[in-house]
Amino acid sequence: LAASALPPLVALFALASSAPDRGHLLDSISSFLNYYQKHTDLVDPNLIFGTLIVKGEVGRLSKTDNEKELEEVNGVLRLCDGILAKHPYDWSVSPYAEQFVTSLMKKPLVKSLPLPSVPASYELENALEEGSPTRAESDTCLLGLLIDGIVAEGCEKLERDPHARGYTLLHQGIYFTIKSHLKLDEVTAQEEIRRICARMLGENRLIRRMGFPSTLQDLFVEQVAVCGVNKFSEFLTDGTVRMIQSLQTSRGCFSMIEKGSRLSIECYNHLSSVAAAAIATFLSA
């Protein structure tokens, strides 16, 4: 769609002239981490997982020759470690979580083949948790990977449900992303990630066409985080990162907006977690 044909809020980001530089992205991430360093009572498992992704993505830059950038990178990594040290969930300090983060840091950046968009021909707002796995089943499958480094019984079938949509589809993407980085049937996992991200791209573009409604902003951002970690360039556009950064408050956390106005002064922890992770994926885009 041409910018003139897009909904007003989306068109504004589409017309922006230049991409945010790494310094700006690192500033956004630092602001997020500083907020949760001061509000440790708000830290939950979602935020810890988001911080693990941030650490992995930012860690890619630790060998930069730019001294100023290296100082910023090291500062962000210290903030990540500070949050992770204060909230050592069993799974977040497991050798498998460490392997996941290390893999994010060190895995070679390979340009992915163009990703086809599978149109989402359904009412997304009414299908946010359709299909398998359920939230409880997803937790079981993810913890099996992160705590024990194994595929829990029944997970492979659940995580391949072709009827999954919305958050359920997204959780499938997280499962196969972790599985790939743990090198558990890596090739097949990457094939599944590609299939899932093609479907998520259709949903993501539908959300854009709808004008980036507040009810779907959290889903949109998490889709970018998951498929951005997998370096699908279709998710890593200049307009997308601006849309995500528009949700960041002056305090560093994130909250929804509607037609350019913030809906609440409250911070949304899940949105903040996935937004920081999503922004981090743009550092090496």
Image (tube, rainbow, N blue to C red):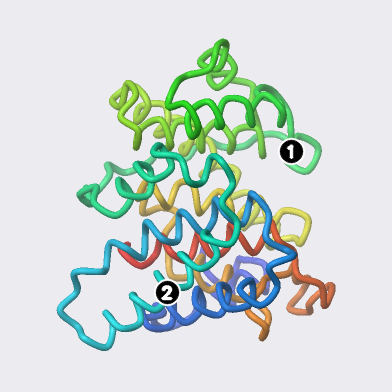
Q: Nearer the viewer, residue 198 or 122?
A: 198
Q: Residues within 10 Å of mark 1 (few under 14, many from 20)?
A: some
Q: Is residue 8 above or below residue 53?
A: below
Q: Which mark is residue 265?
A: none
Q: Tell me the kind of residue under disc 1.
A: Leu
* Secondary structure category for the residue under label 1: loop
Q: Position of residue 250 (x, y in %)?
A: 66, 86
Q: Is residue 258 above or below residue 87?
A: below
Disc with the residue nearer the chain's start (1 vs 2) = 2
Residue 179 position by quadrant: top left
Q: Position of residue 236 (x, y in %)?
A: 41, 59
Q: Quadrant of the C terminus?
A: bottom left
Q: Tell me the kind of residue under disc 2.
A: Val
Residue at label 1?
128
Q: Residue at x 66, y 77 (%)?
A: 38
Q: Is residue 155 visible?
A: yes
Q: As drawn, is 239 to the left or to the right of 59?
A: right
Q: Is residue 221 visible?
A: no
Q: Nearer the viewer, residue 123 or 275?
A: 275
Q: Are marks 1 and 2 in contact (CB under 8 Å)?
A: no
Q: Residue at x 53, y 74 (%)?
A: 242
Q: Position of residue 198 (x, y in %)?
A: 46, 37
Residue 10 position by quadrant: bottom right
Count of numbered badges drawn on the protein: 2
Q: Nearer the viewer, residue 39 or 122?
A: 39
State the CA–CA distance, disc 1 to disc 2.
33 Å
Q: Position of residue 199 (x, y in %)?
A: 52, 35
Q: Extreme left residue here?
A: 65
Q: Which mark is residue 76?
A: 2
Q: Residue at x 44, y 30 (%)?
A: 195
